[in-house]
Amino acid sequence: MNRVTPVLAAILAAASLAVAPARAEPVPIRVGWVVVPFEVIPVLFQAKDVLRHEGKSYAFEPVHVQSSATGLVAIANGDLDVLGLNPLTIGTAIVNAKLDDIRAICDEYQDGVDGYYSNGFLVLNSGPVKTIEDLKGRAVVTLGLASSADIAIRVMLLKHGLVEKRDYTDLEAAPQNMKGMLNDGKVALMAAAGLTTHDPDLLATTHVLFSRRDAIGGPSQESTFFARSGFIAKNRTALVDFLEDYLRALRWFADPANHQAVVRMLGDFTKVPLSRFESWIFTHDDEYRDANGLPDLESIQRVMAIVQKLGLLATVPEIEKYADLSLVKEAAARLK
């Protein structure tokens, strides 16, 4: 009888390992985000039991940035791979920064879609501002200059004859600081953002002067995920897997059967009471997120034209030329 000695067994094992195909390391996908819960992606990817490919073909790496404008610098420098951009930063990236290789790959969220929420701009109930004209000579605050909220303010105030710098001061601040600035009289109007959107204490002392839909004149694609074409070409398989997991998790979050689990996850992430999310998150009182990941490109084109009229863009690029929705369509087809 032939016997395999321990030494021979070790040699055979080593040989089998030598000829076995090496397993590829997951592709890191660094995704920028600004504020939860509208940008819910860092929480979505904590639903590990829902994901199929994370840690296998790709590794999700959330990266917090102050605003989409600062995130744009990071993606231009190669420090981010995927980032949600608003229409102004899309135009700025293409026209000013000459990043003509960026491509829209997936919806993040949309504002003012029929039957869904539209973000509001708040003034104090007891304050001096009763009309938009009352903002003349005062200050307003948003999360970031050139943010989608900032664009909406500029558009709405311009409709009422108020020009930024000449007639009012435009400031930026973190969401948690805006309420204090409003209450202290440092600003006369603030953009609701993230957790302040449904803050019961804030809502008890303020009212919405106008909404983003009022300013833009209809629904608007507020944030669209973009990646650079070189990254897409090099990592297409991993990106489709990433988008499949994103859509899978998004649908799981939107399922009413999972609502309490979603609320707990958001509470754990933000360290705020669960009651701050329970009544509205992933309902019709929330921003709209397309279950198939398809952004409203026509809306982006329309808002970029509005931005050009504000003097913030020299020209308006054709957004269709800067979109590659084949990845998210492939990802969505897997879920049917």
Image: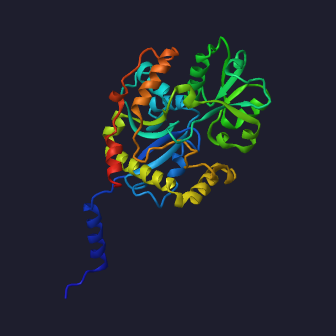
Point 70% across, 16% down: residue: 136
Q: How many marks?
A: 0
Q: Position of residue 213 (x, y in %)?
A: 55, 31
What residue lies at 45% left-to-right and 27% top-to-bottom? 90
Q: Is residue 123 visible?
A: yes
Q: Is residue 160 left or right of residue 22?
A: right
State the image coordinates of residue 117 (x, y, percent, origin top left).
56, 40
> Residue lying furthest left in this view?
1
Could you say where residue 125 lies in the image, as x and y percent from the top left? 77, 32
On screen, residue 89 versus residue 170, left or right, reads: left
Residue 11, by quadrant, is bottom left
Q: List x then y, in percent, for residue 14.
A: 30, 67
* Quarter the N terminus occupies: bottom left
| Residue drawn 35% across the image and 49% down it | 332
Q: Residue furthest top?
A: 166
Residue at 71% over, 34% down: 207
24 and 188: which one is in front? 188
Q: Nearer the viewer, residue 326 or 298?
A: 298
